[in-house]
Image (cartoon, rainbow, N blue to C red):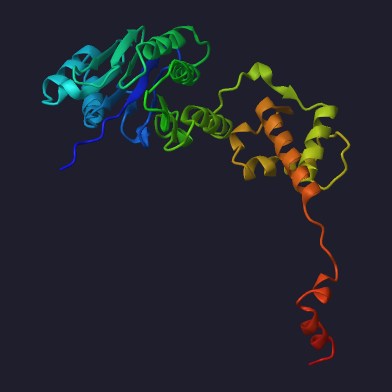
């Protein structure tokens, strides 16, 4: 039986007490790292299991956390019962914000971890300890909410060299109470890049679209009024995209509102629709870019050549049709 493949990986587990969120971010030179390493639940905490990963650490660890077992004790219990513990790596943060990590002695160099306030960074087969140290600094100094800090930590780790074998996959998992689709589950953010030459940058791109479509993280103070000039921009863009067919007059009248609503629905942006004659900057940016691309396609589209069939291979057939044969 072939030996299991090791995850050369760097990850961070963290809690945001103010917003009630737990999350895990991870990158690896391994296919679909998000399917094995990250685990989180709003009623428990967050876990990253890697190196010669024992995937059962995820569900078993979360169950212990639900019972009130501390992060440090969860690490102790999981590894103590594991004959392969020296090949494992583990990061945990609990409901109280206590964080703990474990790096087995047989994990491939460089391997180690940094534990900070309400977060833990860990990695193996890394270029050096600089990777997890940079991740920890990013967690401590990056402004914003948990997903922004987690993504910043991944970027900081990669900037210092990351996995010494290279890059392949990345994942971002964040849970919050009723944060999931429709408010029925806690899986607020679950974005994965399974195979890509620049997985962290691709993860950021996919997250930006996920954020635009499913989340409401934008600052309300950035909302833009739908004044005459901005409505003209909306009407012009919707016209280019085939949603609006009236004049570009700058009045936010019912036909304009209906066209805008349809555009938002077609692009799955229902959560961004407002009734107060204001619009999110992200929506305006997306609309403008979509219209620009549509106009470029229209400008470069090949014009039809009328009568081309009469001059080409179909000429004889056309003549027979005209003669009634």
Left or right: 20 with respect to 293? left
Q: Across the whole image, how many numbered discs are drawn on residues?
A: 0
Q: Residue at x 27, y 18 (%)?
A: 109
Left or right: 41 with respect to 274? left
Is the N terminus in the top left, top right, bottom left or bottom right quadrant?
A: top left
Q: Quadrant of residue 92?
A: top left
Q: Residue at x 36, y 21 (%)?
A: 11
Which one is in front, 40 or 299? 299
Whether residue 275 is visible: no
Q: Position of residue 96 (x, y in %)?
A: 31, 11
319 to 306, vertically: above or below? below
Q: Residue at x 32, y 9 (%)?
A: 115
75 to 197, vertically: above or below? above
Q: Residue at x 47, y 21 (%)?
A: 151
Q: Position of residue 50 (x, y in %)?
A: 28, 26
Q: Position of residue 278 (x, y in %)?
A: 72, 26
Which one is in front, 267 or 257? 267
Q: Which residue ends up furthest to the bottom in the rendered image?
A: 325
Q: Quadrant of residue 219?
A: top right
Is the C terminus in the top left, top right, bottom left or bottom right quadrant?
A: bottom right
Q: Quadrant of residue 108?
A: top left
């Amino acid at each position: 039986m072939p030996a299991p493949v090791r995850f050369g990986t760097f990850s961070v587990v963290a809690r945001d007490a103010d917003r009630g969120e737990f999350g895990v971010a991870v990158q690896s030179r391994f296919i679909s790292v998000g399917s094995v390493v990250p685990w989180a639940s709003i009623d428990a905490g967050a876990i990253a299991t890697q190196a010669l990963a024992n995937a059962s650490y995820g569900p078993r660890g979360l169950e212990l956390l639900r019972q009130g077992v501390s992060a440090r004790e969860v690490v102790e219990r999981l590894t103590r019962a594991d004959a392969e513990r020296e090949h494992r790596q583990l990061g945990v943060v609990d409901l109280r914000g206590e964080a703990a990590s474990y790096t087995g002695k047989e994990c491939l160099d460089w391997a180690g971890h940094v534990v900070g306030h309400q977060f833990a960074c860990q990695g193996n087969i890394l270029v050096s300890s600089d990777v997890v140290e940079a991740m920890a600094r990013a967690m401590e100094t990056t402004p914003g909410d948990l997903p922004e800090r987690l993504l910043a930590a991944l970027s900081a780790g990669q900037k210092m060299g990351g996995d010494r074998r290279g890059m392949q996959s990345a994942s971002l998992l964040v849970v919050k109470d009723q944060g999931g689709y429709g408010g029925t589950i806690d899986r607020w953010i679950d974005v994965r890049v399974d195979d890509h030459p620049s997985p962290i940058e691709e993860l950021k791109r996919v997250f930006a679209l996920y954020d635009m479509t499913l989340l409401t993280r934008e600052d309300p103070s950035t909302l833009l009024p739908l004044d005459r000039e901005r409505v003209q921009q909306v009407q012009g863009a919707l016209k280019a995209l085939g949603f609006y067919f009236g004049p570009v007059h700058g009045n936010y009248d019912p036909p304009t509102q209906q066209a805008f609503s349809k555009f938002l629905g077609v692009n799955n942006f229902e959560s961004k629709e407002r009734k107060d004659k204001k619009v999110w900057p992200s929506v305006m940016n997306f609309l403008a870019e979509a219209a620009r691309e549509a106009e470029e396609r229209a400008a470069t589209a090949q014009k039809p050549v009328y009568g081309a069939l009469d001059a080409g291979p179909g000429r004889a057939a056309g003549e027979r049709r005209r003669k009634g044969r």
